[in-house]
Amino acid sequence: MYIKKPSVALAYECLVKEILKNGKVIITEDGQRCKEILNVLVEITNPKLKTISSKYPFGKKAIESYTKQLLYGSESEGEFVYNYYERIREYPSYDKKLKNDQIDYVIKKLNSNPTSRRCVISLWNPFIDQKVKDVPCLNHITFTKRENNLYMTVVFRSNDILLAFHSNALGLIKLGELVAEKTNSELKRYTHFIVNAHIYIDRDKTEIEKYFPECLKYI
């Protein structure tokens, strides 16, 4: 499935409706009903547009919180064995004795070799993630610079579209703009690939009823 929109807000509304209407019902590992579509590609052609959909249940506060955690980290590690800031800026070796700042690497690589195809950030760590319950949904981020334009592509193994996609995409665009600023470029396009795009149709029925009432007939 392919969605091309100028803004995250427009892509969000389109994607939610598509999954609720055309998604396949599955039962997850923890016994919850979802509607899912596999292999979804979302292309945002004007990342500068930061409008927030009025249909997004968590709103501006959630987007700001996610963006802050992504860019600057969290003061509390909580119950998770990872956070996105750590995996991006302090990627751990299997014993966590070594850390790698992948953003710093990408910036230096783009500045020294602007046509490089090696500007890849990995978040999945098999030494850790094969053994724990909570693992990163975001797995890869890549940057490509052509002339003064920066192209950003992210890969999610799994993405909660109703509650998380909007925050994820806008937060990651801010990360892309940070890289663009440090590499004398402009974030031209943001591409968001999702292996499993889903919505929890029982757990989040209240939100569906409130924000997408026209789609209730599909669940």
Image: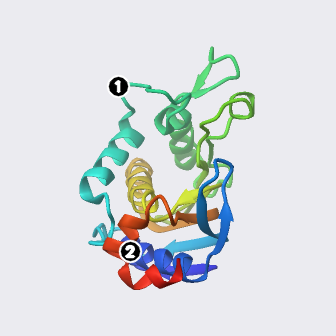
Amino acid type for the residue under numbered disc 1: Glu
Residue 158 placement (x, y as % from top left): 61, 56
Q: CA distance from mark 1 to mark 2?
A: 31 Å
Residue 100 placement (x, y as % from top left): 58, 28
Q: Is residue 178 left or right of residue 198?
A: left
Instruction: Please report the residue visible at 37 percent of the width from the left and 54 percent of the height from the top.
Output: 174
Marker disc for residue 75: 1
Give the residue at mark 2. 7
Mark 2 element type: loop
Q: Residues within 10 Å of mark 2 (few under 14, many from 20)?
A: many
Q: Is residue 205 left or right of residue 218?
A: left
Q: Quadrant of residue 78?
A: top left
Residue 199 placement (x, y as % from top left): 53, 65
Closer to the chain start, of discs 1 and 2, is: 2
Residue 119 placement (x, y as % from top left): 62, 49
Q: Residues within 10 Å of mark 1 (few under 14, many from 20)?
A: few
Q: Is residue 160 left or right of residue 68?
A: right
- Does 43 appear above or below 144? below
Q: Quadrant of residue 177?
A: bottom left
Amino acid type for the residue under numbered disc 2: Ser
Image marks 1 and 2: residues in contact by CB distance under 8 Å:
no
Q: Quadrant of residue 156?
A: bottom right
Q: Which of 104/83 is in front?
A: 83
